[in-house]
Image: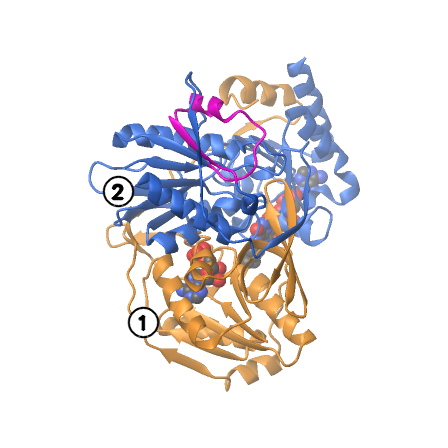
Amino acid sequence: MKILVCISKTPDTTAKIAFTDNNTKFDAAGVQWIINPNDEYYALVRAIELKEADPAAAIHLINVGGADSDAIIRKALALGGDEAIRVNAENLDSFGIASQIAQIAKENNYDLIFLGKETIDYNGSAVGGMVAELLDLPYISLATKFELNGTTATVTREIEGGEEVCEVSLPVVVSCNKGMAEQRIPNMRGIMAARTKPLKVVEPAASDALTEVAAFSLPPAKAGVKLVDADNVQELVRLLHEEAKVI
Amino acid sequence: MSVLIFIDINEEGAVKKTSLEVLTYGARLAQQLGVPAEGLVLAPVKEELAALGKYGVQTIHQVQNEALAHFDAQVYTKAIAQIAEKTGASVILFSNNTDGKALAPRLSARLKAGLVSGAVALPETANGFIVKKSVFSGKAFADIKIATPVKIITLNPNSFTIEAGAGTATVTPVEVTVDAPKVKTVSVNRQSSEVPLAEAERVVSGGRGMKGPENWGILEDLAKALNAALACSRPVADAHWRPHNEHVGQTGGAIAPNLYLAVGISGAIQHLAGVNRSKVIVVINKDPEAPFFKAADYGIVGDLFEVVPKLTEAIKQLKG
Ligand SMILES: Cc1cc2nc3c(=O)[nH]c(=O)nc-3n(C[C@H](O)[C@H](O)[C@H](O)COP(=O)(O)OP(=O)(O)OC[C@H]3O[C@@H](n4cnc5c(N)ncnc54)[C@H](O)[C@@H]3O)c2cc1C
Ligand SMILES: Nc1ncnc2c1ncn2[C@@H]1O[C@H](COP(=O)(O)O)[C@@H](O)[C@H]1O
């Protein structure tokens, strides 16, 4: 079994969000980069668990990005990926990224393609569905549970106010959500092994972007909190009713 | 040229509330562009569709096909693409809800139509076609330019107010050719009595300050008095005090209710990332230095075990 896990690089969850170049670029000064948490905790760790159950399985990692992605790719290898491919292309839109991933996937016949449910910077929740369509494969989004029985997968996905259990034959593309697996910390052996695992850099195939960022902006600052005395909850209820009009 | 609006139907055959938001949004956009607003229904439905005309759509295309009885993103995408081509749709709209997140990107790749997911406002169309979306988990916005002839937008839940007028829509049956779905639905587990968290107008949320799952009764009472959905912080879900689907934040769900009432939650940046699009934030915390107060509109510094029951009583009194 061959599993492809798509790994993206995002600013650390505590990074200060600011923009430069006339608000057209994210200000990366001083920013610590991490593996997108949804890709790491849910997609990658579940893939590693599947490999632990089936040692013949192989986990390939893919990242579309510049050389500054190599550090997060090495960390993903340390956690348990077997080999990695970096498609050397930057600043693509979701469709551009999906086209590169689909191109690599076509050459390798994966049984399973795992992605995170979304990147925490772009919040597209888009690349997975696009990859699935480009490969004409079934797509299960927002999966919270994934069990494999031979070549049939039983997957639970989130729906509004509940969940749905479905069954599908491999190959399939899955976007991974909370519940799939738990965060792991790479151990020393993993970190040592990652240094010698293959990280192949390939040049991108031609592809068109369908969208572009015109400008970024920050939400207006909050006016400041109105504190109400703990012995006077009626006042809070009055404010919520008469001033904020939310109850 | 038209605006085509995907109308999402739940397992009970009812139109989802998020679809009413998209219908209102789509009707307004169609007006802005001077083209008709048309709806599209694929799943079996128990409601009177013509009545959806009150949100401003003129026509609803209804497909009745066994292959669409259960949701499968691959099959649904093929059906939507056929109808979009037949009707000459120039903008296709979805809610950025669970189904929209599966369908819109597939359709975008199929039609090579630029996608903006998570829109928070109507597009600017005076000079190009630019859509404002939420990025960095609600900490910023991006204006995205779509350059392709066909455009796809998914609208963030709770970011556009539903408006209903008079009017009825003409419901027209349409045919599509699709294969049998490859994904088989085994079971659906939906609490139809509860307000889904993503759609809820009011949310009561608990953190580690609640001390343990056995104390959640006071939050449930408060939520009931407010007709609110329940949510929680990540450590609460990790400790299995509450189910994972209630976890909000950077790695959980992102919500934008009118009222978010946070009880015993410190307000870590990763938690705020999932809730900072809420219109009004109320914080109850015994620590006046809790970072959540900086993001709040109203706050009470106090012991939640004393404040919450009193608050519930005061709300019940208001509602009489
Ligand atoms: C990569 C990453 C992703 C993360 N994603 C998320 C996420 O999606 N969602 C999320 O929530 N967190 C997330 N976290 C965790 C986050 O950093 C915080 O640790 C977490 O939000 C804290 O939860 P809490 O506020 O419930 O608990 P605590 O920080 O322990 O706060 C408890 C609060 O309760 C108050 N309190 C205690 N007793 C009482 C009382 N009797 N009355 C009133 N107040 C009381 C305390 O003053 C305190 O402020 C993430 C962290 C990382 C590193
Ligand atoms: N540059 C990238 N390289 C590899 N995978 C990516 C990249 N960007 C996004 N992905 C994957 O696609 C998922 C969804 O991303 P998005 O559509 O941006 O929310 C992420 O969780 C990743 O698994």
- Residue B195, given in percent of the width and then of the height, sits at 62, 33
**Chain letter matching colour orange:** A
For mark 1, name the chain.
Answer: A
Same chain for the residues under marks 2 and 1 in the image: no
Q: Magenta stretch: residue B120 in it?
A: no
Q: Residue at x 63, y 30 (%)?
A: B228
The color chain B is rendered in: blue
* On-image quarter of the C terminus of chain A: top right
Classify mark 1: helix, strand or loop.
loop
What kind of colouring is applied to the model shown? by chain
Q: Please state which of residues A225 and A44 is positioned toward the viewer in this rendering.
A: A44
Q: Please state which of residues A211 and B149 is positioned toward the viewer in this rendering.
A: B149
- Residue A240, given in percent of the width and then of the height, sits at 55, 22
The segment highlighted magenta reads B41-64
Q: Please state which of residues A123 and B274 is positioned toward the viewer in this rendering.
A: A123
Q: Residue at x 41, y 67 (%)?
A: A102
- Residue B270, given in percent of the width and then of the height, sits at 53, 51
Rendered view: B108 above or below B122? below
Classify mark 2: helix, strand or loop.
loop
Are there few (<14), some (14-19), or many (20+) residues within 10 Å of tag 2? some
Identify the mark at residue A205; answer none if there is no mark: 1
Residue B134 visible in the snapshot: no
Q: Check disc 2 and give the amino acid type.
A: Phe
Q: Quadrant of ligand 2?
A: bottom left
Q: Is residue A47 rendered to the left or right of residue A210?
A: right
Residue extending farthest left: B127
